[in-house]
Image (cartoon, coloured by chain):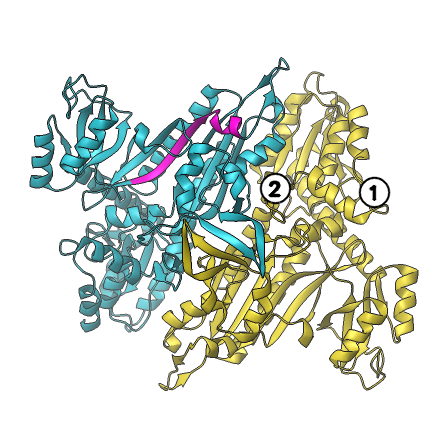
Chain colours: A yellow, B cyan
């Protein structure tokens, strides 16, 4: 057990140093490794497999909704980036510039895409001519680069993986419906695949994507009470289309300007999983995206029949499509328990001589350490039930935490005292719609506007800051 | 039929201008679109779906063989690229350099990866310590950049998509076995998924990958008689490990140097499909990777029951897992035939009132225009049989073409006259192993060494060039 203790002891407790706890997990669960390229990381097999599982679920859903995958260049000529004024102002300060090809200086610098609106627009201008060409519902799975000053694995890195959907439609109504639909796809994915409750809402003007008419976002609450923007969906109106001269002729042969959207989620979601579900023993993975859903640990494996039975369970679960691993190495069961807890495997099956005799195995849930028996003659069903219970339990636990740390406030003083007393969290408070008040709330309390949630509550008649009539309820928080 | 004729007439015939024929297909089959970034392209949904299908088949196979996917940074610091001497000499002249992040000049330039050996090596140096850490069988699906002077869609572009496998092993034997295994995986994939016969062999010293001990390749023959390198697998020995200081302790606690490989295929394979199978009516896609395997075209679709029946066939085939499309648009059947021929759909199903009466449909094979009837009560089986027949027929046709254009020669004069008389192709001829002869054959005849095939033939005792004793048979050709 010496090894076991060493492994567990090597994570900094969350309560002691949250940032270090996070860093310990990404390293010790073997999700990433640092590189000599500052702000860029290696996503290791275990980390990448989580992303592959996410990608598969989302990609299937996107395609069911009629989207098609494409691949745009990774470079954007400076003149192309400059075409939409707000967009270039938002992104130019943080792009990586390619200036040389081989030994030759380029005539025009190219940036490595920070996002690909401009490339999609150039393409749409080439291929959209008639209403028959619309809508185009495109998506791509690529990496993008933003030259951040301070970086943290998954949460903010200079290169990150994402999908970016870009669609173009005949009417504003269609484009707005697409924007909302994709936000719902993300929220459903967070709930159903990541066991992560999110708040859906609209960003305030000051927090919109560069070039968007409206930005919608899902916001999740992390263990430390900070908010994490987990996905965004933007409605562009016809601004980009005008800047890039995209037009089409409608059924009456009239030249019209189309309306656009874009939407994306990133590898940041892996960071969100860590900080929503992780604990002081390591990672806790939702079954839907866990690279290994079930680990089988034989107990007293030298005894006759134990390894045979363990192999039999493995084969049965594998045949049923469950991502299962059997660890029959020489390490002690205790050491194995600690290792797979660190790696966040949702369900551990223990099987020893006595279990075999009694016709069951022991199932231990990672998130709750809840133990149950599963009858061997009902193994597949039993394991599936447990995995569902794990998912449901994880979601409820995260939701309870979110509720516990959501404070409805009607004054600046109340915001301050709630945060001081109960720690960081979501603050619900009314707002007049004035950017000056938004800034002042942040200045006085430390929490900024996260979103104007779709699910509004009437907490008060007046703005929490200036006392003038309130326009809406805002969710405020400290942001990652 | 006016539209139809226009569509067909718009491809340049292969015999008139092969390069233009190729360009016409990539554009008119909607595989790619050009961009304002010179040498980079948009891979459009239809082109990208081919790549997705390839990727799925290969990725599954890689994983069956124990490989894991990872993701390395897209940037390589100049000092890291410089660590392996031959490697940097091979790649530095053709990389894109990032010199600025936002407004700041970087302390050290970063190149956009042209290939990732150096990044994998840096990572292996961090994570490989003991024999227990070996082998590592890693792969990544990414894009890479090489600053080519002249570019052509899929065949040679500044950015292209690929997979790059990178493995590290305890012994040279294991690494060599991996190198050979992956070459076989590629050759099997070309035969079974792309219906493309290839020659497996070893590259000569002058044609090796920069930094490799040995490079193996598969070579395919295109319609114009030129050779296309369709995949490569490299054995590195311990050269990279030494340059990057990667060591491990073996079972006896002795410090050892591991051995490495890398292997890759790229979106170039889409170009290979076009030039192996395409014809003057457009693209011809192998069923295994075709985005649409079967297109259903209703005949006299305004007549009662035709569209209902067509929809029924569609639903049946879709439920059976076949990638099927029903075109019930207002275009004429003739126009539709031409369109799906252009797009290379392997099998066309025609269904009209008379077919319905007789209880069958007509199946037309894209590659041969061969027509058969499929009984409607045996639809799924009948279609599957036809798709297999299409695959087999395409492979045989390509193989026949390759055989017809492979010339065994024993003198420089014979090489010249065969190429002149029969056109470009593969030339089999003996070689002494001397690089001077390799260069001279190319200078005198225009064909360079493609590979030393594993399947050797004894054509002569002496080198085709100098007359000294021959070491091996080489396959020569003009290369893409």
Tell me if residue B232 is in the magenta stretch. Answer: yes
User: Could you tell me which chain the residue with mark 2 belongs to?
Assistant: A
Q: Quadrant of residue B450?
A: top left
Pick the residue in front: A318 or B218.
B218
The residue under the point 49% across, 58% down is A140
**Place of residue A21 in the rendered image (x, y in percent of width and height, measured from the top left):** 78, 44
User: Could you tell me which chain the residue with mark 1 belongs to?
Assistant: A
* A350 shown above or below A49: above
- Quarter placement of the C terminus of chain A: bottom right
- Stretch in magenta: B229-243
Q: Is residue B31 something that shows in the picture?
A: yes
Tell me if residue B20 is in the magenta stretch. Answer: no
The secondary structure making up most of the magenta span is strand
Gap between marks 1 and 2, in whole Å? 26 Å
The residue under the point 21% across, 40% down is B478
Closer to the chain start, of discs 1 and 2, is: 1
- Judge the density around disc 1: few (<14), some (14-19), many (≥20) Cα neighbours within 10 Å: some
Residue wearing tag 2: A35
- Whether labels 1 and 2 belong to a single chain: the reply is yes
Q: Secondary structure at mark 2?
A: loop
Residue wearing tag 1: A13
**Place of residue A434 in the rendered image (x, y in percent of width and height, measured from the top left):** 75, 81
Q: B453 left or right of B136? A: left
The residue under the point 73% across, 42% down is A25
- Quarter placement of the N terminus of chain A: top right
């Amino acid at each position: 057990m010496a090894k076991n203790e060493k492994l567990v002891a090597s994570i900094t407790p969350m309560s002691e140093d949250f940032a270090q706890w996070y860093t310990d997990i990404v390293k010790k669960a073997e999700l990433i490794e640092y590189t000599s390229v500052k702000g860029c990381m290696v996503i290791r097999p275990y980390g990448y497999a989580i992303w592959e599982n996410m990608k598969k679920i989302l990609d299937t859903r996107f395609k069911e909704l009629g989207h098609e995958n494409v691949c745009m260049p990774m470079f954007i000529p400076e003149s192309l980036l400059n075409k939409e004024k707000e967009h270039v102002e938002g992104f130019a300060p943080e792009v990586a510039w390619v200036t040389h090809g081989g030994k030759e200086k380029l005539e025009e610098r190219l940036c490595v895409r920070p996002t690909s609106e401009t490339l999609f627009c150039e393409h749409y201008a080439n291929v959209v001519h008639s209403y028959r060409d619309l809508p185009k519902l495109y998506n791509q799975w690529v990496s993008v680069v933003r030259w951040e000053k301070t970086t943290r694995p998954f949460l903010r890195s200079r290169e990150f993986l994402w999908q970016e959907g870009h669609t173009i439609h005949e009417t504003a109504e269609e484009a707005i419906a697409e924007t909302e639909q994709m936000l719902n796809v993300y929220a459903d994915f967070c709930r159903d695949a990541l066991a992560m409750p999110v708040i859906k809402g609209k960003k305030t003007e000051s927090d919109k994507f560069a070039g968007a008419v409206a930005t919608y976002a899902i916001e999740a609450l992390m263990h430390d009470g900070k908010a994490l923007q987990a996905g965004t969906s933007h409605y562009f109106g016809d601004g980009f289309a005008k800047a890039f001269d995209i037009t089409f002729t409608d059924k009456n042969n009239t030249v019209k300007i189309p309306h656009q959207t874009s939407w994306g989620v990133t590898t940041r979601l892996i960071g969100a999983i860590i900080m929503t579900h992780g604990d002081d023993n390591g990672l806790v993975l939702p079954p839907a995206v866990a690279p290994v859903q079930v680990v089988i640990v034989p107990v007293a494996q030298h005894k006759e029949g134990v390894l045979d039975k363990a192999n039999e369970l493995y084969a049965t679960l594998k045949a049923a499509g469950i991502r299962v691993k059997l660890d029959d190495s020489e390490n002690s069961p205790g050491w194995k328990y600690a290792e797979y807890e660190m790696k966040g495997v949702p369900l551990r099956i223990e099987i020893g001589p006595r279990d075999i005799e009694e016709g069951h195995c022991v199932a231990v849930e990672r998130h709750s350490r809840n133990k149950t028996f599963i009858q061997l003659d009902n193994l597949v069903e039993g394991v599936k039930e447990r995995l569902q219970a794990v998912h449901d339990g994880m979601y409820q636990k995260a939701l309870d935490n979110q509720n516990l740390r959501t404070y409805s406030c009607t004054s600046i003083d109340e915001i301050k005292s709630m945060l001081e007393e109960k720690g960081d969290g979501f603050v619900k408070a009314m707002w007049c719609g004035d950017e000056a008040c938004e800034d002042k709330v942040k200045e006085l309390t430390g929490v900024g506007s996260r979103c104007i949630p779709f699910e509004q509550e009437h907490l008060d008649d007046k703005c929490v800051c200036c006392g003038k009539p309130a326009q809406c309820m805002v969710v405020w928080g400290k942001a990652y």
